[in-house]
Amino acid sequence: MLLVVAKDPNLTHALKAQLDVPGLRPFFVDGAEDALFLLEGRQADVLVISLDLAPDVQGYASLLDHARQNEIPVLFLDSAATKPLTAQLGQQGFPHSFTLPAPVTELSRRVLQLLSGDDPLVGQTVGPAGQEVVLRRKLGAGGMGTVYEGVQESLGRKVAVKFISEESQVGGTAERFVAEAKALAKLRSKHVVQVYYIGDHGGRAFSVMELVEGPTLEGLVSEQGPLPETDALRLIRQVLEGLSEVHRHGNVHRDIKPANIMLNELGEPLILDFGLVRDIQGQGVTQAGMVLGTPRYLSPEQAGGRSVDHRADLYSAGIVLFELLTGQAPYQDPDFVKVLMMHSQQALPSPASFGATVSPAAWELLQTLTAKSPDARPNDANAAAQLVDSACREAGATAVDPAQYLALREELEPLAGAVLDTTGHPHVSFGEDISGALGAFNEVGHQLGTLEVLGAFERADIKLGDGAMVLFPRGENVAALHSGSTSAERLHAENENALVGLFQLGPRRG
């Protein structure tokens, strides 16, 4: 939430019309008391406070105390007349200000910079003419570089922009960065992130690629623990589909792990981060004897620094499946060398030793994928996927066909829907106006205490202006369907079957 506190109605009107910060819904109040009341039930991402509220520092004390206690960044809107007040507030630990009059677009950019720790790249435009991307916010950073969310305005789409770090601009890391982009550019799979183009900005290489906004498998398991077996098998089946495309082009990913697999809005996994990709024919940039990858997920041949082929990725996929089923990687020790030795020498532990129960078919699949010898594993990702299908059938389950999502989504258009947890975070969502719908869902959740209100009831029908919302329980969470142009009764009656089908297909959270 972006909370704007300003008394001047003309300023508020201009900000409401033009202030645009991707991912943040702005709320406007005209006083400190109203702002604090609003903050009682919500966590603000940024506070924008106009210095027309009070003539001295004391008039802002309550808001600033709340911001300090909750670690909320604050941006003051000042003017030439309020510069002395701005200086006093800076001495109290609030140094960020934006001087008016100025274009509101510049204010939007300043808020983005504040969210990204004043990163100088945020707000800049990169890329060639006709394909320009405006960098909106920093998403994260790793050893090789930093990833930003951007908007390619010529196509009206959000993208991810990955910059190589300045320290890595020379040497082998830079070569791997270029290799990653080239490898991705050849791939065409809905389970592999798509790269659009590469470029250079200020002497730093970058790649522009598909933006995936869901959680990683690492985040998914961290949030909810072990997954139901059918969900885990469905996800690893789709990962194997992506790996099949990677291998078809003669590449080995070499770093398959939960943190490198992200879920899209349909709950489908996409493989990303090809920073360690290597050509199977030996034309890559890695050197013999090097151990590259993440120790908990490395194949025995990688752990030993030996040459690898596509079957190393199948081993890592098996370790990922083990973690999806048990909540933990099978080999754990503070000493990473010991973990490498475990991969090479220690049999795969039983899921029961981690407190998990899996079907005999799933256990056999795990053992096959993680065989110590590459020759004992499936020949390729397609063969591994067929073993997953067999495990699903033998366990009395069927791997979900993602095409069912699309059919149900078409049936429900132009509606918007989501499954929300207790924090209002959407786990499964669809619809063209999902951002507006999620705002409405969150409003209802905060006002009614959605989960508690539903209790044992089958559903809640809520009228919202000219539209309606239907809420109904799904495990420990809440599923919600929203429309701007029909009644709740009609909304539920006409779409009940499709709703149940859609939300059953998504990753279960309760």
Image: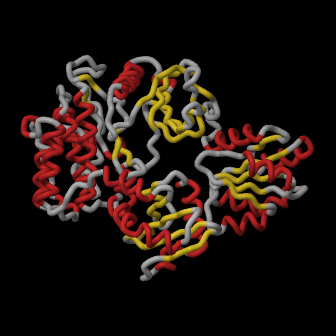
Residue 123 point in image, percent of width and height = 64, 34
Colour treatment of the image: secondary structure
> Image quarter for residue 95?
top right
Relative to 31, say whether 279 is above or below: above
Q: In the shown orientation, is residue 344 left or right of residue 286? A: left
Q: Residue at 39% of width from left, 25% of height from top?
A: 181
Q: How many marks?
A: 0
Quadrant location of the C terminus in the rendered image:
bottom left
Residue 437 or 27: which is nearer the viewer? Answer: 437
Q: Residue at 20% of width from left, 46% of height from top?
A: 318
Q: Residue at 76% of width from left, 41% of height from top?
A: 104
Q: In the shown orientation, is residue 459 left or right of residue 86? A: left
Q: In the shown orientation, is residue 294 left or right of residue 196? A: left
Residue 426 point in image, percent of width and height = 47, 58
Q: Residue at 7% of width from left, 39% of height from top?
A: 376
Q: Residue furthest bottom?
A: 456
Relative to 499, say whether 212 is above or below: above
Q: Is residue 445 visible?
A: no
Q: Residue furthest left?
A: 376
Residue 284 or 302: which is nearer the viewer? Answer: 284
Residue 91 point in image, percent of width and height = 79, 47
Relative to 490, say whether 344 is above or below: above
Quadrant location of the N terminus in the rendered image:
bottom right
Residue 215 or 329: which is nearer the viewer? Answer: 215
Q: Is residue 312 visible?
A: yes
Q: In the shown orientation, is residue 231 left or right of residue 367? A: right
Residue 225 point in image, percent of width and height = 33, 61
Relative to 506, say whether 129 is above or below: above
